Amino acid sequence: MNVNRLGSALLTRPLTLVVLVFLLAASCGGDGDDSGGGEQAAVQRLVVGAGEDAYETEGAEANVGAYPVNVNIFEGLVRMDADYGIVPALATEWQFEAPNTWRFTLREGVTFHDGTPFDAEAVKYSFDRIAKAGGGTPGFDKNSTKIIDDFTVEVTPSFENRRMVEQLVHPENSIIAPGSNPGEEPIGTGPFKFSSYDRQEQIVVERNDDYWGEPPTLEQITFRFLPEPNARRLALEAGEVDLILDVPREAVADLEAKGFVTETSDVGAYEAIYNNISGQNGYTILQDPAVRQAIGYAIDRDALVEGVFEGLAAPEQTMIPSRLLDEENAGKIEGYAFDPEQAQQLLDDAGWTVGEDGIRVKDGQRLTLELINGFPSAQVHGAVPEFVQDQLKDVGIEVEIVKTPDSAAYEERLNSGEGDMWLEQGSQNDANPAFLPALLFWSEGLFGDIGYQPLFAPGGEFDPLIVDALASPDSGEVKSLVADAMHVLIDEEAVVLPLAGIYRINVMSDKVQGFEAQPSGLQVRYDEVSITGE
């Protein structure tokens, strides 16, 4: 892969030239000179401590700068606000045309960072590229995108999909310059343009002075990849970064006491256990729904929220943010109250008897389950695995924790089907209420089989509810259908056991102004962020 590694030009200049420039600047008053000795304008450079560098760099799936760390190089036809509403971006208008087509009117006068004009050809190039990589959540295929004129396109998904506009907000569906490849040089239309990328170290972007909207105040942003949460915290305290994303909850009070500022979002993610119901490779215990339900009743979620999450989480059991469903529909999902007696009764009835060491046995087999910890990273979950381990031991279930070192190792384990319980912190990354259930648990999957379906897809009543939710034109009906599907997935099948609703926590120096947390970390924008003087 060829990447553009631009260093700081100033650092390569001879020292004498730097001194000369400084003296000339000092001797020239100008309109901006403060002869009264006031504060100088702050240097508008921001350093962000981000998580793991999980960019794809090869082929049609290359997404450097877009996902999972969105550095504001790219934009989509639409974007999502903090309330999961749809906001115009590179498209100014859109309308549905039966039976399954969307027509978009494109914004005029926009250029890519390399000077290429934005038009319908760029949309077709971008969506055709996604089609080659499998079609994405919208379900693009090679015939999906049709150019009507320079600033009008029609897009027809490969399946009946009335949720497509809600899905287009995901950065993976951004528009890139025709002929470009984000794995080589990311070229978009966003408020910041690509400067350099050092894999596993950092990505740097610079202000796009020709941005079609209001140009940013920040001149440069450096995103440093620091997968270990404590490393991000230490970097902030040492002044090496100005802002850290996804802060460990146990660190918040101490950082606030030291003068740092916390910015949190509404709930946009969840902590949950997925139960392997496939029986692959000898992992058969959780094929029994009674054992799955017993796990649900054995976990004290209030204690988890107040203890492990330091009170900085919500006791939601809807998996997706409950406000996406509205109160009536969210009420269809019962979840699991803490009831260890009920858990033990379920296990007793299923034939699991308590052994001498307190662990249950059945037909000579111990009730031992492997808990796989690793998505989006093992560090994100903190002490949750150990909490679950202790809780389940109290009802006679032995848990062995398997910590995967990175996302690649987690996916490898997932594809092999080796594990009983899988601990995940998933995020509602688009405005489609059916996004996560359809992506992970629908037998066909929005991306097809991505490794989750063989282990976790319940089939049965669940699948037609998701199909209908994707095809329904009525938003109220969609919410009702998704809630019904979640009731099947959580309450009846116990394939998913939600533990808590998660909101994003970001901590920054008090010099950082204008930063707004988003429920989906992918939607954070930096064009209104600035740095104040010392």
Image (tube, rainbow, N blue to C red):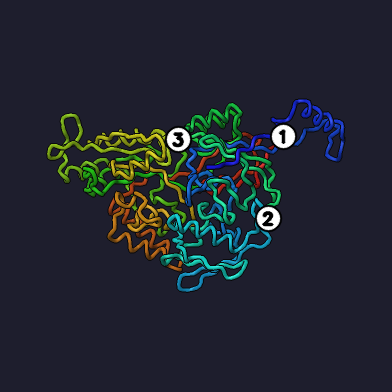
User: Cα distance, mark 1 to mark 3?
Assistant: 33 Å
Residue highlighted by disc 2: 212
| Of the image marks 1 and 3, the number of the one nearer the N terminus | 3
Splitting the image into 4 quarters, where does residue 150 fall? Answer: bottom right
Q: In front: 408, or 453?
A: 408
Give the SS element for disc 3: loop
| Label 1 crowd (10 A; few <14 / some 14-19 / many >=20) | few
Please state the total of marks drawn on the protein image. 3
N-terminal of the two: label 2 or label 1?
2
**Residue 233 appears left or right of 438:** right
Q: Nearer the viewer, residue 289 or 426?
A: 426
Name the residue rendered at 19%, 29% in the picture: 357
Q: Tell me if 447 is positioned left or right of 90 in this view.
A: left
Whole-percent x, y for residue 224 in the image = 56, 35
Amino acid type at image mark 3: Glu
Above or below: residue 35 compared with residue 281: above
Q: Nearer the viewer, residue 266 or 168?
A: 168
Q: CA distance from mark 3 to mark 2?
A: 43 Å
Residue type (three-letter) at the residue carrying disc 2: Trp
Residue on which the image places disc 3: 310
Residue 265: give x, y in percent of width and height. 53, 45
Q: Secondary structure at mark 1?
A: loop
Residue under circle 1?
533
Going from the N terminus, do you reach mark 3 or mark 2 first? 2
Of the residues shown, which amino acid type is indicated by label 1?
Gly
